[in-house]
Image: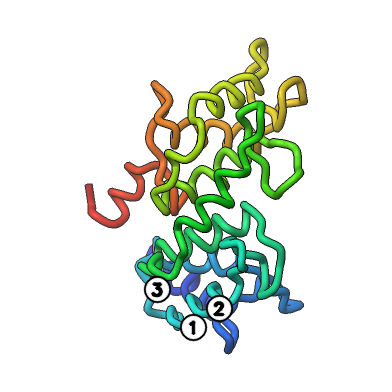
Amino acid sequence: MLLMLRKCQTSDVAGLQNEDGSFSGDEWGEVDTRFSYIAICCLSLLHRLDKINVEKAVNYILRCKNMDGGFGCTPGGESHAGQIFCCVGALAITGSLHHVDKDLLGWWLCERQVKSGGLNGRPEKLPDVCYSWWVLSSLIIIDRVHWINKEKLIKFILNCQDTEKGGISDRPDDAVDVFHTYFGVAGLSLLEYPGVKPIDPAYALPVQVINKTFFGR
């Protein structure tokens, strides 16, 4: 059954790759670097990356790189922290990080930290706990996480907790939700906060899951 599932999933995902290396996400053919990341991540976890044209996939992602060092959803699209994670994560999984200008991208990412210690997704936007993942994971992947103030970010995330009922919100005093709770905890994991298990910055999965998947331990 597991073998059949893997074959089905591999066929479904690989069939979404377009001639230019991009991936479509639906029946209407929408293209977005988020779909590139999802396809590459899933196929990697299934040990089936050989079922797509990895070189074309990487080249398409590189076409989405901007002069500021960031990446957009399509070529020419505005740089955004969420898209940067997708592109940098996909490049990391495929062993293609050498194409990234790490200093240039690192500066764009570290400039996302605002006075409160939180991170935003684009210039002049409010901080949001979810970017504790999108920005931080990318900085770790390119080895530039030391360019931000970790302690201030930890304080920002903790200030977004509901100390009575639990959970984490996007910003202090807002309503908590599962989405921001997950990314708040994931951010704390990347920051090596005590008592939180480590998470892999490229796969967004616990390190123990990645070790079992790829190394059998």
Mark drawn on residue 123: none
- Measuring 43% from the left and 25% from the top, which residue is drawn there? 193
Assign a secondary structure to mark 1: helix
Q: Quadrant of residue 33?
A: bottom right
Label 1 vs 3, first from the N-terminus: 3
Judged left or right of residue 30, residue 15 is: left
Disc 1 residue type? Answer: Lys
Disc 2 residue type? Answer: Tyr
Mark drawn on residue 56: 1
Disc 3 residue type? Answer: Leu
Q: Is 179 rendered above or below residue 162?
A: below
Residue bearing the label numbered 3? 49
Label 3 vs 2, first from the N-terminus: 3
Q: Nearer the viewer, residue 72 or 168?
A: 72
**Residue 42 visible:** no
Residue bearing the label numbered 2? 60
